[in-house]
Amino acid sequence: MNIALIQMNSQPDRSANLAQALRLMRDACAGATPDLLVLPEHFDWTGGTPGEKRQAADLVPGGEAYEMVRTFARDAGVAIHAGSLLERRPDASTIFNTSVVFDASGAEIGRYRKIHLFDITAPDGKVYAESAVVAAGDGLLVYEIGGFRVGCAICYDLRFSRLFDRLAGLDVDLIILPAAFTQQTGRDHWEVLCRARAIEFQCYFVACGQCGSYRAPNGEERVMFGHSMVVDPWGRVIATSDREIGVINAVLDRAVVDKVRGMIPMAEHRRDLWSMSVVSTSVDRS
C-alpha cells in the first residue's frame, strides 16, 4: 500500500490551514495517487485562546474542514486519514479532538476522538492544558484499507501502551498517529516511542506531525517537532522528514508484518497478566 504523510505548520487561521492542507494533498497526488493520505493533528486549527478554539470547532459532518477533505477524497479518488480537527457537537458545550477517515469515494469510514488529553508542564516551563477546552473520547476505531487493519491514536496517546495493547488485541497491522508533538518532548521521546510501539506490537507505525511554530495568546512561541515518520514492524524507520512542511511517501508491505510475527510469535506468547495473583512485600529498613 502506498501512503503519503502531509507534514504541516498550522496556525490559528482556518482559511490558511485548509489552503495549506489542500495544496499539499494536491502535491501528494500530482504523480501516482497514493492509496492513503494522512494529515497531522489539528490540521484545521492550532493555537488560540480557549474561546477561539471553541469558536473554531466545527460540525462533523458538515463543517468546512470536514467537507474540504471529503470532497478532495471523492474528487481525487484517494482515501484520507484526516489527522484531527476540532469537532463541535450541536447538543453539547464540549468539543473533541477528532480523526475522521474517508474512503476513496469520499464516504466517511469512521471517527476517533482523542482519549488522552495533553495536560503537562514542559521542561521549558510552558503549560499545556488541552482538557480546559477538549473533552476526552471514550471509544476506539479500527478500519480496513489496502489489506491492512488500521488502529487509530492521536499525539499524547502515544505514551499510553495499554491503548496499543488493546489495538493489538483487535489484530491491527498498522497504527496511524497524527500529532503535534512539542519540540521539548519530541527531541527525546518521539522516535523512541514510535519505534517501541512498532516493535512491541509488531505493526507498521505511521506518525504524521506538525512542524514549525505558532504564537500562543500570551506571546510565547510554541515550537512543534515535525519529524513525521513511518516505522516498519521490525522497528526500522523506513521514511522520515525533518522540520519542514512537505509530503513524505512510503510503501507498506503486508508480507513484512507476517514475516516479523512469524519470526517472533509474540501474539502466541502473551499472557493475561491482569488475572494473575500479586505478591507484594515490603522491607523494614529501620
Image (spheres, rainbow, N blue to C red):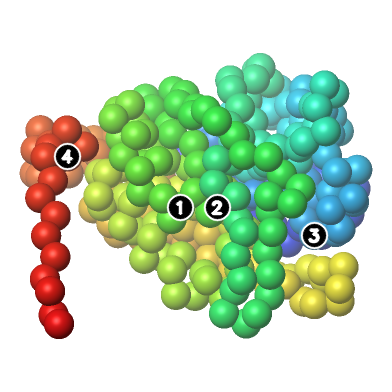
Q: Earlier in the sequence, mark 4 or mark 3?
A: 3
Place of residue 43 in the rendered image (x, y in percent of width and height, measured from the top left): 72, 48
Q: Quadrant of the N terminus?
A: top left
Q: Residues within 10 Å of mark 3 (few under 14, many from 20)?
A: some
Task: Indicate the amino acid at tag 3.
Answer: Gly
Q: Which residue is mark 3?
A: 47
Q: Is residue 250 visible?
A: no
Count of marks, rendered view: 4
Q: Which sits in the foreground, 133 or 46?
A: 133
Task: Indicate the amino acid at tag 2.
Answer: Cys
Mark 4, secondary structure of its residue:
helix
Q: Earlier in the sequence, mark 2 or mark 4?
A: 2
Q: Earlier in the sequence, mark 1 or mark 4?
A: 1
How far, Cα to Cα, is label 1 from label 4?
22 Å
Place of residue 21 in the rendered image (x, y in percent of width and height, measured from the top left): 75, 47
Of labels 1 and 4, the one closer to you: 4
Q: Which residue is mark 1?
A: 158
Instruction: Locate residue 243 relative to residue 149 in the image: left or right.
Output: right
Of labels 2 and 4, the one closer to you: 4
Q: Which sits in the foreground, 15 or 74?
A: 15
How far, Cα to Cα, is label 3 from label 1?
21 Å
How far, Cα to Cα, is label 1 from label 2?
6 Å
Q: Which residue is mark 2?
A: 155
